[in-house]
Image (spheres, rainbow, N blue to C red):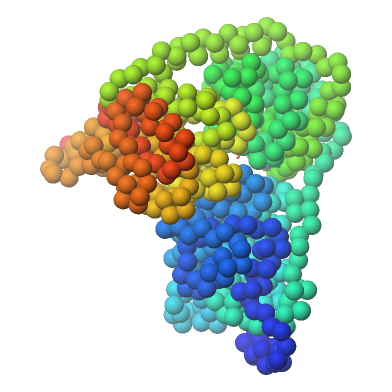
Amino acid sequence: MSATAQSTDANAAAGEQDLTDGFHLVIDALKLNGVKTIYGVPGIPITDFGRMAQAAGIRVVSFRHEQHAGNAAAIAGFLTKRPGICLTVSAPGFLNGLTALANATTNCFPMILISGSSEREIVDLAQGDYEEMDQLAIAKPLCKAAFRVLHAADIGIGIARAIRAAVSGRPGGVYLDLPAKLFSQVMNADAGAKSLVKVVDAAPAQIPAPAAVKRALEVLKGAKRPLIILGKGAAYAQADDAIRALVERSGIPFLPMSMAKGLLPDTHPQCAGAARSTVLKDSDVVMLIGARLNWLLSHGKGKTWGAPHSKKFIQIDIEPREMDSNVEIVAPVVGDIGSCVSALVDGMGGNWPAAPADWTGAVKAKREENVAKMAPRLMKNSAPMDFHGALGALRTVIKERPDAILVNEGANTLDLARGVIDMYQPRKRLDVGTWGVMGIGMGFAIAAAIETGKPVLAVEGDSAFGFSGMEVETICRYKLPVCIVVFNNNGIYRGTDVNAAGGSDPATTVFVKDSRYDMMMQAFGGVGVHVTTPDELKRAVDAAMDSGKPTLINAAIDPTAGSESGRIGNLNPQSVVKKK
Ligand code: ADP
Ligand code: MG
């Protein structure tokens, strides 16, 4: 019997009994599992689903484009350790959400992309359905797991599997395909309720092997120049006290990766953020906690890391296959960061030797030297502003408001802000992550405001902002306490490039000169401010943060300031062939 015949029979048999349907079962399953917010874009076949979810008490936040709804769901996952939910329509909406799903998976953020899809019978025979696409097959290689539910009675199991896949082990993105027909499939209400699953212990603790802990401590004890690198996995784990205990009891300098900044304050005496090159090059034992030796750490080799084979690596990660991915890991500790770090702290006991003073002294000296070098550049109150002057003002804002969330993307705007703006609390810095992807700005800002209730400061390059700029309407519509600062230097990297062919077309990297992004916010009833000096910038941000009103500050940055691709210009291939 075909699935259609089966469900028609079930519908008939249901007769006069109390009935439920796919719509209600999906909503009930999500609510049963504590889902409070759905990020999405309405349309066929999920328009009614969104309405019904809202009526059922779930907060449904409608975006202008699925990519930003997806990014919102992903960062909600990072902030809460629960899968963020993104809801999209079929084919094109699904594809728009896919960038965020892939990005979430790459960054180890738990999210579930739920997409409506077209009729299986027609799609599989390629008969040309409305928005026909084999979405499950397309999603599969781009996420951690992908599931499709065909029968209403399987909705509970489908959602349970999606939740477990997203948050257990190494977190990631999950795709859940719900064909249009499923939503209106009817079944007995009692049986439906019984088919739902409340997921128990979705992300079970993964306790490290005692031998692995002992091995790691032995390597650490033998170190002359030890270093701890904290990654965003450590921030995600919410094991803040255990991590602080490990760092402070060992006395070892620590280097936070971008989104791990604030796990311990950047002003902590052991923070080696301002001595990054020195500690990477000169350390002899490096303990990675929730950080991968990918391109962001030069793969653990090359001149960044000093003489070849001069280091021993200890790595704490929940994913066993991460070990030896780039260089040899002499002491792998596999487990969740909370359990692993606690076991290490226990193993250190009461009389763990202090980190060698010549090393910690050298790191401290280097840090102070670099901080002193940077200081005068941050105080420059010129018009137009350069990046450092403007960032100096924002640095003070975060110092005075350490519980605000900083969202950051761009090229120079990103690379310089990462170094200049100190963070004081965990999970307050959200940025472009593992891919260095542009376009996360407004999605992250919206979810950060919704999930935490804290004020959000989004520091955006003018180009980066453009990828998600239309979502300022969403920010105004939901009246979110988001203050966006657009670092407007008239273009990508800088605003002064010229078209080498002459002619009237602008260069490929420049935008309309002296644009007024602030007026975009005014168009939707928010506050727009145009500023030209760091003092004005600071005043405008303070006013925005005090009022909690959606605000966009157009910060005029010197168009000649900024370097190609910010700090990663070396990744940009350059032609060496001169054409006559
Ligand atoms: P960063 O870019 O900050 O260095 P990465 O995203 O490269 O961070 O690395 C994060 C690492 O953290 C991943 O290898 C991931 O498997 C790991 N991870 C994520 N959550 C946990 C957790 N709860 N326990 C242990 N490891 C985790
Ligand atoms: Mg720019």
Residue 121: x %, y % from top left: 55, 82
Q: Residue most toward the left?
A: 503
Quarter in which the N terminus is drawn? bottom right
Residue 297 seen by the camera: no
Residue found at x 76% / y 25%: 245
Residue 284: x %, y % from top left: 68, 18
Image quadrant in which you'd find residue 322? top right
Residue found at x 87% / y 18%: 350
Residue 569: x %, y % from top left: 40, 31
The image shows residue 116, relative to residue 546, as above or below, that is below
Residue found at x 72% / y 26%: 244
Q: Is residue 392 left or right of residue 182?
A: left
Residue 366 seen by the camera: yes
Residue in the foreground of this view, choosing between 36 and 26: 36
Q: Is residue 348 left or right of residue 127?
A: right
The image shows residue 264, relative to residue 23, as above or below, that is above
Residue in the foreground of this view, choosing between 123 and 385: 385
